[in-house]
Image: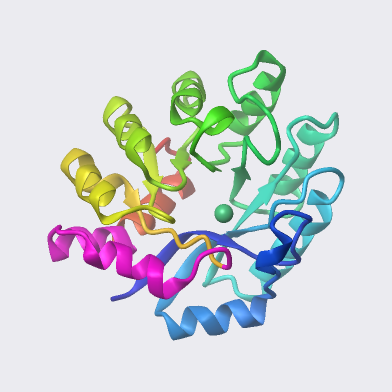
């Protein structure tokens, strides 16, 4: 089955999880895509807060230029930094990237705190979709939904589908979920809510294609739903983003 992948890290590793050696450069990544039938993916830097995101965003832009049909570039910023808005503008207007990846735990920020309103206001003006790491604490889907509901042009993907993410999918119709690190059971529950808002995600190179693909394959859902999750929903998501629609 053809695959689109909503969650891929690309480039040099940051100081996090050094035991996992997550550095991966673009030609190696494309070889992996070819091996596992991945036609297209959203790619963004590894976690690397502080002043390193601009240079890692530059690398993503360079890779997208080299493989424009395979890669959809998302940039990263450290929302706590004074120059976060400047980098947000540069991601869209200079580097021509499509979206933003945020990780409230790694970047240590509470999404609904008023300090970060200006960042989301600007992302909304730029119509930049955001893939949020979701999970516990600052990354809980409940906090992220507050942002999704507040800004009319912000499209949000909740990464790492789990129980609380299924509830978010049910609660708000303008939010997508992504499957990296999930379990077949959560995919089945999400399909019962809305099979059109589930995207396949691998979180490569932290997770691996054989396991992440097998999780979706193991879900007891229709072949039609699998096709949507692996490919069609991502294409629909992209086409809405390209038209500037909230999805
Ligand atoms: Zn990730």
Q: Observer-nearest residue: 163 or 10?
A: 163
For residue 34, above or below residue 190:
below
Farthest residue to the top: give it: 114
Left/right placement of residue 224 relative to residue 44 reads: left
Left/right placement of residue 41 relative to residue 225 reads: right
Left/right placement of residue 135 relative to residue 94 reads: left
Give, as a single range, the part of the protein colored magenta: 205-231
Q: Ligand 1 is found in which quarter of the picture?
A: bottom right
For residue 33, above or below residue 49:
below
Give the dominant element type of the magenta stretch: helix, strand or loop.
helix
For residue 17, above or below residue 134:
below
Residue drawn at x 25%, y 67% is 217
What colour scheme governs how the chains and residues are painted in the rendered image of this protein? Answer: rainbow
Is residue 136 covered in magenta? no
Residue 63 drawn at (x, y percent): 68, 70
Residue drawn at x 33%, y 74% is 2
- Name the image quarter holding the C terminus: top left
Q: Observer-nearest residue: 87 or 76?
A: 76
């Amino acid at each position: 089955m053809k695959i689109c992948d909503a969650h891929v890290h690309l480039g040099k590793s940051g100081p996090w999880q050094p035991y996992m050696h997550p550095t991966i450069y673009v030609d190696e990544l494309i070889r992996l895509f070819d091996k596992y039938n991945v036609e297209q993916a959203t790619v963004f830097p590894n976690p690397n807060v502080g002043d390193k995101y601009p240079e890692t965003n530059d690398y993503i832009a360079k890779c997208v230029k080299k493989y424009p049909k395979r890669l959809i570039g998302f940039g990263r910023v450290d929302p706590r930094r004074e120059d976060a808005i400047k980098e947000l503008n540069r991601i869209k207007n200079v580097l021509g990237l499509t979206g933003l990846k945020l990780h409230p735990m790694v970047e240590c920020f509470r999404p609904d705190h008023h300090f970060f309103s200006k960042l989301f206001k600007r992302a909304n003006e730029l119509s930049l979709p955001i893939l949020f790491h979701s999970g516990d604490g600052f990354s809980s889907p409940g906090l992220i939904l507050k942002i999704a509901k507040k800004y009319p042009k912000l499209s949000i993907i909740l990464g790492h589908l789990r129980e609380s993410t299924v509830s978010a999918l049910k609660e708000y119709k303008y939010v997508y979920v992504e499957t990296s690190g999930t379990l077949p059971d959560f995919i089945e529950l999400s399909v019962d809510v809305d099979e059109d808002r589930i995207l396949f995600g691998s979180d490569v190179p932290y997770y691996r294609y054989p396991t992440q693909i097998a999780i979706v394959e193991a879900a007891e859902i229709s072949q039609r739903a699998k096709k949507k999750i692996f490919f069609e929903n991502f294409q629909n998501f992209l086409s809405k983003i390209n038209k500037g629609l909230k999805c």
